Every structure is written in structure tokens, then in C-alpha cells.
Amino acid sequence: MTLDSILEEIKKANSIVILTHETPDGDAIGSSLAVKLALDNFGIKADVIIPEYSRVFKFLPGTEDILTESEIDRYDLAISLDCATLKRLAGGEYFENARKTIVIDHHGSNNMYGDLNYVNPVSPACCEILAGIFDYYNMEITQDIGKCLLTGIITDTGGFKYPATTAETFEFTAELLRKGINVSDIYKRVMQTVSFAHFELAKKVMDRLEILEDGKVTFTYINKEDEEEVNAEPGDHEGLVEIGRDIEGVEVSIFIRQSEKGKDEYKASLRSSDYVNVSDVCIMFAGGGHPRAAGATVKGTVEEVKQKLLKEIKKVL
Ligand code: 5GP
Ligand code: MN
């Protein structure tokens, strides 16, 4: 059983590093901190390397120990969480240099790049997979670990509203509530409160939103100048893609964000409402994700990127 082999590798390793995907969301950070805290409780030390993340998640226990880089370049064991491909892994060099590698993820597009891979594409969040793993290992889910796991579960299920949400999602949340975790407080922090910069970016995104393909597709964008103008910080663009998706009749929402100032390259975020598999669309651009939420990096100007994406989307509308 993969889970037994994973535990063996963890016990054998003298140095462990925990990594996750770039522009990490709640599931990425929640998973990383939860694994670190769980290992701590077993007397096993691990480093978490996350070069940059949204201050929304600063309330989580263990963030004070997050490293942006490490002096160790060859860890005994690297654990990648919530990340479909090595290319997307922040600090991927630590993974490549590690003696042994483990991948735990819930992306259908995961290409099994670890020595040991535990991937469940049906799970709504990597944090929900971890809840099952900790249970299997008889590791106690403390309040701190629970807060981290719940953060990932809430963000990746869109606040329990996406169809991937399971009965187990609610059962686990109920368990945490009984343990005294303030579910409402976490919900408010990660789903409701937005920064002023996010609010200003949302206004621009709404102003520029184009409704295409008989109302089935929306397109909008931000460039680096917009982000500078509103003093955006990492994570301030999160959720902007949902503005288009939530309009009645819209099947696919496209939001693109410039990778670097002056560069003709954009990070595309796609969301779908009912039936379009946006992960398949993004795979055409060497990206990936989930059927209803996916991303890719696309070269070109705003107009060129828009046309490239539209061409693929029209085939599956
Ligand atoms: P977002 O649009 O929020 O950045 O990402 C939506 C989903 O797609 C997330 O699950 C994310 O991990 C995945 N995703 C985003 N961009 C990429 C990419 O460039 N490559 C792959 N493989 N997955 C991506
Ligand atoms: Mn996730």
C-alpha cells in the first residue's frame, strides 16, 4: 500500500522538505502546514519552503516557520502537496535534488512525477486527502492541524458549494466544529474578507469584462500596471476569475493576468459552470487543473491570448 511506503520513507529520512505549487492558494498552504505540524507531533522535523504567499493565510499556525529558501540543497525526502506537475512546483529544484520524492495531490492532470504518488482526483481538496491519511496513520488532528486542513477544504470547495464537495467534507468539518475550531472565523477570513487592492482590481475586471459567444463566455484581464496602481500584493488577484463565471448563462470565464511587466505572456485562469472541461482546454497550452477550474501560461498580447483561448473553448462549448 502506497500509504505504508510513504510512512516508511518519512521515518527513514533525516531531512524532509515540504513543497507546493506557485501562487499558492488555501489548499496549497493549508496542506503544507498541516503536514509539517503533523510531523512535528511525531517528533519529525520538516522544512516548509514557500517563496511567496498571500497575507490572507498569515493567521494559520506554523506560518512563522515557512522558509523562502533553504541552505540544504539535497534533502533525503521531498514531499510535494497539491501540485499537478514538477514544472508548477515552487522550489522544484529541492524536489529534483532530493534522494526520494513523494507526491500527494488531487489534480486529475497530475502526471505522477514522484517516486511514490498518492493522487485522488475525486477528492475536493488535497487537505481532505490529508485528513484521510492522518486518520490512517492514527495521527491526531489537533486544533492547529484542523485549522490548516479546514482552510484548504473551504477554499477548494468554494465554501462547500462545488459539486466535488462530499458527505465526508461536511462530516470532517462537523468533527472540527465539535473540537472547538471556529469554522465561521476561518470561513470569513478566506472566503469573505477582501483587500482594498482586490476590490480595486475587481472594479477594473468588471469594467473590462467582455461577454462573448452568445453570453456563454466571458473574458477579462489585468496587467502589471494595474497591479502596481492599486499596490497589489501576492494573492490579491485570487477569485477575480469567478466574477465572469457567476453571471447567468455563462459557461466559461476567462481571466488573464500578465506574468511580468512589459512581457507578452499571461497566466490564464479558466472556470466553467456546468459542462466544459477547462482542464482539457488548459492542457492544450501545457497547463492543467480540474474540470471546472484550471490554468495555463499563454504567450501573446491580451488580444492574442484571448483569441488563442477562445479558439480552443469554441470547440468544446
Ligand atoms: P487558478 O486559476 O486558481 O490559478 O488555478 C485553478 C486550478 O488550476 C488550480 O487547481 C491550479 O492548481 C491549476 N492550475 C493553474 N495553473 C496551472 C498550470 O499552469 N498548470 C497546471 N498543471 N495546473 C494549473
Ligand atoms: Mn487544491
Image (cartoon, rainbow, N blue to C red):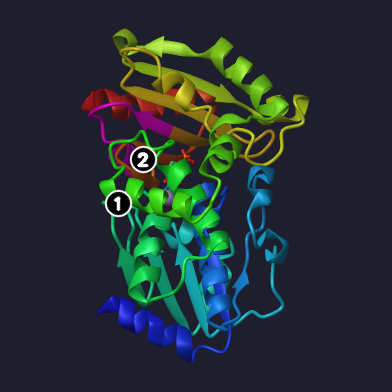
Q: Is residue 25 above or below residue 307?
A: below
Q: Is residue 25 magenta?
A: no
Segment colored magenta = 270-284
Of residue 64 and residue 19, the one placed in the foreground of this image is 64
Q: Quadrant for residue 132, please give it.
A: bottom left
Q: Quadrant for residue 36, please give it.
A: bottom right
Q: Name the residue under label 1.
A: 168
> Considering the numbered disc 2 on the image, is that residue within a helix, a strand or a loop?
helix
Kind of residue indicated by mark 2? Cys
Q: Is residue 274 above or below residue 130?
A: above
Of residue 24 and residue 124, the one placed in the foreground of this image is 124
Residue 26 rendering spot, x and y as whole percentages: 53, 48
> Considering the numbered disc 1 on the image, is that residue within a helix, a strand or a loop?
helix
Q: Is residue 282 magenta?
A: yes
Q: Quadrant of ligand 1?
A: top left
Spatial CA distance of label 1 from label 2 is 29 Å
The reply to whether the residue tagged 2 has its Cβ within 8 angstroms of ligand 1 is yes
Residue 292 rendering spot, x and y as whole percentages: 32, 36
Q: Name the residue under label 2.
A: 282
- Work out which residue is located at the far top of the displayed protein and give it: 214
Identify which residue is drawn at 63% across, 54% down: 60
Residue 40 rendering spot, x and y as whole percentages: 58, 76
Q: In which quarter of the image is the C terminus?
A: top left
Q: In this view, does 292 lie above or below 301?
A: below
